[in-house]
Amino acid sequence: MSHAFVEVQKAAKRFPGASKEAEPLTVFENISFQLKKGEFVCIIGHSGCGKSTIMNALAGLDQFSEGSMVMENKEISGPGLERGVVFQNYSLLPWLTALENVRFGVRARWKGWSDREVTDHSMKYLEMVGLKEVVDRKPSQLSGGMRQRVSIARAFATKPKLLLLDEPFGALDALTRGVIQDELIKIWSKDQQTVFMITHDVDEAILLADRIFLMTNGPQARIAEAVEIDLPRPRQRASIVKHPHFYKIRNYLVDFLVNRSSELRTQEFDGQGLRYPTPVNPVQLEDAEATTDSPPASPATEPQENLVKFTPKEVRHG
Amino acid sequence: MDRTTTEWKLSLNARATILAIMLLVVGLGVWEGLNQSPLLGGGEALSEYEQLLAGADESAKVPPPSEIAVKAWQELSNPFYDAGPNDKGIGIQLGYSLYRVLSGYLLAALVAIPIGFLIGMSPLAYKALNPFIQVLRPISPLAWMPLALFIIRDSEASAIFVIFICSIWPMLLNTAFGVAGVRNDWVNVARTHELSSLQTAFKVILPAAAPTILTGMRISIGIAWLVIVAAEMLVGGTGIGYYVWNEWNNLDLTSVIFSILMIGVVGMLLDMSLAYIARFVTYAE
């Protein structure tokens, strides 16, 4: 049996209730998805639906209460260098300069390298994000955008197989965000890493992603749909909005976030079978709708039972 | 035209310096003036015997700054003379005190920083050791002196022990506090880069906690310098504390005031040197 590059099955996160008798609070449950190698996947959902928990679990920093995660047929347990993380708050070490911060990652990744090799490799990635002139500055002497660039350079420089981005541009102003998005596309198209990214920005997701996972609202959140973005690459911020499909996709996503994310609740996903998010292509959907009057969401796929080895990660939280 | 700035051309520092010098001059002037006893103010020099008598007639006077300045000049121009157990230069006395303070302090650092690290990292160690720390910490370091003298049977080592025990607590608690307060994000950076526990401790937690640790070390050296004077008054023999007490027994108040001043200056230098070291480990977030 072959798995996808990354396979998450029946993941759930529960917190114990306030009292002993109280029902545990289920943030999300029955989350299953696959990531293909080289794919760029964004996940969108309202606050509190557990996006960050999913990301931290993939990073090995947090644990699911139930469910399993497999990457390249190996179970994910604990953090590792094959998975790189870019946090929203940059997480640079403030006592190190920009170069030293990148070197920190590169040194950890390739322990046998000489100092010269480590520096050269780090510089290459700092140049890629346009920070060649400020490599000797401490994070406190850099702007927010520059700090996030250092963080991105550090993550890409270690060449992880899976790159996890937790709202990397959430704290940046729109102009800076645009510039760094372009840099991210550039650096990603060079290395073709698999990227899993949280974002709140619909336009950003369309610009970057191959697929967008849409999460319903928590508690008991699910990944309802996986929207396929078939806009041609390479994409550019300026020209992508002119593509005829752009607004169809965008409207579909906004409609989901505004209306359907709160309506689609447990009853539509009951049953404990393995269920991947429903693949949706908003463009084809709209074309089909124009001819026939079929219901918008395609019927849920039949529960599949090819479960990977089930390993409860955590019996009780806290 | 810019009229507002012309009035304050001097920088804040320059103005502060002028004010400080003025305060010094006025303070010393008042002190000097109050001590011009009418009997002594006659003009001609009195013999030592007459001075003693004069002092006995009137109520005793605190020596004026001018006398202290003369004394300071004498002592500081030859700080390292050694004319027997009761007559050593100020440099030698301060040297003994510094030696005791630094050895007790460094021993304390060697114990406090690793244990503080442990307490900061492990909630178990914190909970287990906290009751002991809370009981031992408020004990006046001098209260240990009899026990130390009895067990160690050496006054020199006992003084060092007293310094050790008084400087251990701020370093221990600040290290624990600094280590426990290291931002989780930074620890996560270490984790996602697969650093071993030892590497995490040295490459992430130590630099992150270093400013807090240095603050504890700075508090400790201040306390150690406070305590050494009292400790040396008890154990005697050498050191600046002994010197103060010895000069009091000699009724040489000029020397007492001069040594008080020296204690202050050395204490300030100790604090400044740690502040200087701290500059290298502080970081802005």
Image (cartoon, coloured by chain):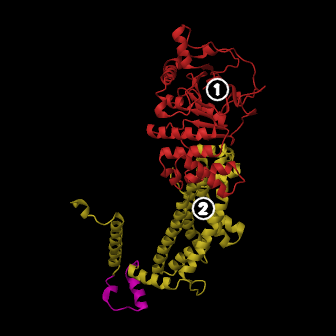
Chain colours: A red, B yellow
Q: Residue at x 62, y 12 (%)?
A: A299
> Which residue is tagged 1?
A14
Where is residue A308, by image quadrant? top right
Q: The residue tagged with tag 2: helix, strand or loop?
A: helix
Question: Is A106 contained in the magenta span?
Answer: no
Q: Amino acid at mark 2?
A: Ser
Q: Residue at x 60, y 38 (%)?
A: A189
Residue range highlighted in magenta: B37-62
Question: Is B61 contained in the magenta span?
Answer: yes
Q: Position of residue A117 (x, y in %)?
A: 66, 55
Chain containing mark 1: A
Q: Is residue B162 visible?
A: no
Residue B120, above or below A257: below
Q: Amino acid at mark 1?
A: Arg
Q: The residue tagged with tag 1: helix, strand or loop?
A: strand
Q: Residue at x 60, y 83 (%)?
A: B85
> Which residue is tagged 2?
B167
Q: Of A110 and A220, which appears nearest the observer?
A: A110
> Foreground mark, 2 or 1?
1
